Amino acid sequence: MLPEDIRVFGNGGVKERNSVLIEGEDGFILFDPPGEKTVAQLISESCRQLGKSVRIIVYTHHHVNHLLGASYFPEGIICSHETTMLQLKEKEIDLGVRLPNLLFSSSIEIRCCRGWLRLFHCPGHTVDSICGVYGDILLGGDTILENSPPFWGEGESTTYLRSLAELSSLNISLVIPGHGKICGRDRLSIYVDYIEKLTNSAWYILERGGEPDSCRLPLSEFYPNYLRVMVPEFHLANLQTLSREWIARTQRKETS
């Protein structure tokens, strides 16, 4: 059960993300703005009923589907990791995206009704990914997905594992994922197991002269409930990224 000052807006599906509304003393904090107008309207109505507006909007990373919804809440200050701003400028992401104006490098704390929401850098899914902790609840962003394997197409497997180790050290009992249903902290160990097994298997093939394209290890071997997963392309993308990591590691060895 979630406390009364936290509300989650989402349908538990892969495509639609979860937007989390946390009540503060002088307004709401919106963690991951919605992309759908109907969801934004639900959030606005919830704020209106409680007589408060959205004070701070949190970008969890630079992917456009996690940014566009900020336009529905023009009064909100936008908070993100400093790398998110760099990614937006480097990739020339526009499409009417509002730029963040409250940046942090390692972590930041925001006062809420029951204490402090701590936002912190948690790279892996992307270089700029962040997570949040409020009490014993982890706000996972796309670092944690309930209904999909982890995905680090723009990140790096060892970085992801370091971030998961940090998350595993936290005293949390519930996880609100970026996509999917609210789940327990066991999702963290499932992710670690998946990345470690997939990495070891891919390295084994590549170390013995196998071609990167031969690393087509079955999703079912590492993610037993794969039939519920609507995006198996994440799994293939992870294998392709591991191949690139292997090539980069081999080149570093050759030049050292």
Image (cartoon, rainbow, N blue to C red):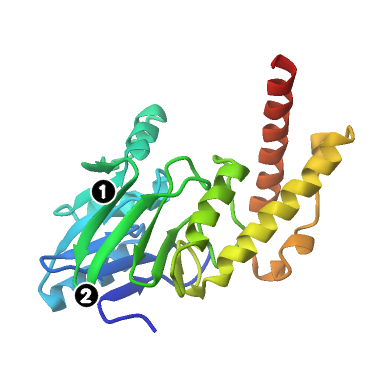
Q: Which residue is mark 2?
A: 46
**Left or right for 26, reference 115:** left
Please tell me whether residue 116 is drawn above or below residue 63 in the rendered image.
below
Q: Check disc 1 and report its element: helix, strand or loop.
A: strand
The residue located at (69%, 17%) in the rendering is 256
Which x, y percent locates residue 105? 32, 40
Residue type at numbered disc 2: Ser
Whether residue 169 sits left or right of residue 225 in the image: it is: left
**Quarter of the image holding residue 150?**
bottom right
Q: Residue at position x 33%, y 55% from top?
A: 119
Measured from the top left, where is residue 113 in percent x and y? 19, 72
On screen, 223 above or below 254? below
Say whether disc 1 or disc 2 marks the residue closer to the N-terminus: 2
Q: What is the x, y in percent for residue 91?
A: 42, 30
Q: Which residue is mark 1?
A: 79
Question: Is 193 situated above or below 49?
Answer: above
| Residue 114 circle label | none
Q: Residues within 10 Å of mark 1 (few under 14, many from 20)?
A: many
Q: Quadrant of residue 27?
A: bottom left
What amino acid is labelled 1 in the image?
Cys
Give the spatial CA distance, label 1 vs label 2: 21 Å
Q: Work out which quarter of the rendered image holds the N terminus and state it.
A: bottom left
Between marks 1 and 2 in the image, the one whose residue lies nearer the viewer? 1
Question: Which residue occupies the extreme top position in the image?
Answer: 255
In x, y percent, where is residue 147? Answer: 58, 67
Q: Residues within 10 Å of mark 2 (few under 14, many from 20)?
A: some
For this orientation, the residue located farthest to the bottom is 1
